[in-house]
Image (cartoon, grey):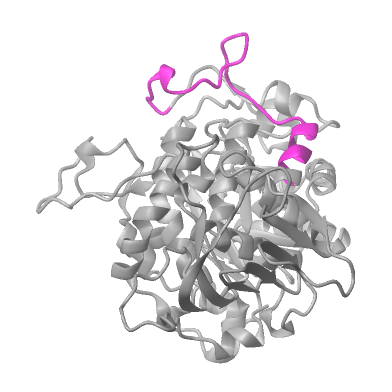
Amino acid sequence: MKSSFIATCLVFVATLVGHAQTTTPPSVIPIPQSMTIKDGVFHIHPGKSGRGVTKIYADEASLATARFLSASMEKSVGKLAVVKLKSGAAVPANSILITSQGAAADLGEEGYELSITTDSVSIRAPGQAGLFHGEQTFLQLLPPQVFASQKNAEGISWDAPCVEIKDAPRFQWRGMMLDVARHFFTVPEVHAILDGMALHKMNVFHWHLVDDQGWRIEIKKYPLLTEKGAWRQSIGFKLDPKSSTAYGPDGRYGGFYTQAQIREVVKYASARHITIVPEIEMPGHACAALVAYPQYSCTGGPFTTDLPGGVFNGIYCAGNDEAFEFVQNILSEVLDLFPGKYIHVGGDEVLEDNWKNCPKCKARIASEHLAGPQDLESYFIRRVEKYVNSRGRTLVGWSEIRTGGLAQNAVVMDWVGGATEAATAGHDVVMSPLADCYFDHYQSLNQAQEPHAIGGYLPLKQVYAFEPVPATLKPEFQSHILGAQANVWTEYMPSLNHVEYMAFPRLCALSEVLWSPKASLDFDAFSNRLEPDLLRLEKLGINYRHAKPEPEKAETTK
């Protein structure tokens, strides 16, 4: 939840202390809650040993976080030794201190204080997430070349301006969803996305692992899910087959993550204080599952994963108890792999045609005294939620899970409405509206000069103008808005290069919307700070779209 500090610290401050001349505020994204700029710089003296070499000191609880900072600079600056700080010992000059000791309690779990003087750097936070975020800010204060994967040309001075920063996020859910069901992305490619998120203090990775066109997670109890459901005959979506490398030895298109690979990604994300929320679609968007196990549908099939974009009849049978046992067994393995609080079950775009004509579903409607097939989704989600809750987790679903009555403890991910109603009823909400958060939309009206996209238009400025709290929501219910996330649906993004182009720098803009005080948001100032940030992305090896002037008239492609 938001700390008391956020409620009181609402204005970004940039003040030059000791000089009359003006200065350009450091290019930090997202902009901190408060920042005072002082005279001078702190200079890092890299080296293996000897007097004058900069070292990182940390209390015992913060050693892993300190080592992460050292490792982040090793390839560019040079590795800095991490030294355990003895209790009561003074920190020497020319050092970087990472500690949870003496931190202000009102910073909350993710807040931090960063102090840079000419002699030293100190990052204090109550928790390790806050220390990590403070490290990201410190890295952004250094030359962008710090993010390079190899040592840079001689002559770079590793200087950070002297500042005093007190910072904490506005929202607790700052996310990005990546769809790997339409096109498969490898573990290193997922890592690259997580790196870009961590740099901008995004903390939730919504991993869309299942849809009609592909099943991407190994489930040991049901091996056919990946043997059959993870593959299709072609790349689909009228794309150039050469635009992706996700082909198996037999030429089929697709792929999946083993459970060992899932654990690897979870560990990688956790080290960056990013929680992964897996999505296992149900009761609809289940063609990939039903290709392998058609007996859990109403019709028995046949089903296929060779599908374009759209909504199809791959629906679990809501009248078949064995179908519920099937999804529960799947969720059991999924929950063992992902330790986070939330599990996403989709719940969107469910066609009721199969349910209307299914004898088992008709019997379920009668036995549960439901009004009709329209209430079967609510029944399905409520039944699944009981299992999810029994495992100590919280169910998340798209806007449509409100149909027929919302499950008792469910979180609504609002993409087509319902946030105000759900929050007023006491449910937590994650905002992800189609108009402002769908990064599969074009970034320019001049579509002829952009990579092919699903449609729509979402420029950088509109993302930055997005306000997550609905204007119609009364103040007493606004705490139920957990935050927001970007959705990267990949029907027309068959490569990581394309995904990154669509995500960045729009994700940079959203990160500031979700982290920084609303009163501090200024698009022109953000645009000025964005230029060095793009260089950081370049050094990280992340592709991005550079802002271009918009045409007077739109040019569209077909």
The residue drawn where x is 72% and y is 61% is 395
Q: Is residue 20 magenta-colored? A: no
Q: Position of residue 388 (x, y in %)?
A: 81, 58
Q: Position of residue 523 (x, y in %)?
A: 32, 69
The one of 385 and 71 positioned closer to us in this rendering: 71
The residue drawn where x is 46% and y is 30% is 494
User: Looking at the figure, which quarter contains the C terminus?
Assistant: top left
Q: Is residue 219 left or right of residue 372?
A: right
The residue drawn where x is 74% and y is 56% is 66
Decide: is 234 above or below 96: above
Decide: is 542 above or below 26: above
The residue drawn where x is 80% and y is 61% is 62
The one of 548 and 147 positioned closer to us in this rendering: 147
Decide: is 72 above or below 41: above
Q: Position of residue 477 (x, y in %)?
A: 59, 86
Which residue in the rendered view is the most extreme toward the left?
A: 552
Which quadrant of the figure has residue 264? top right
Q: Is residue 167 left or right of residue 27?
A: right
Decide: is 356 above or below 129: above
Q: Is residue 349 left or right of residue 248?
A: left
Which quadrant of the figure has residue 265? top right
The one of 486 and 142 positioned closer to us in this rendering: 142
Q: Position of residue 351 (x, y in %)?
A: 54, 47
Q: Is residue 259 magenta-colored? A: yes
Q: Is residue 111 left or right of residue 147?
A: right
Which quadrant of the figure has residue 241? top left
Where are the magenta residues, as a range? 237-266
The one of 428 and 417 positioned closer to us in this rendering: 428
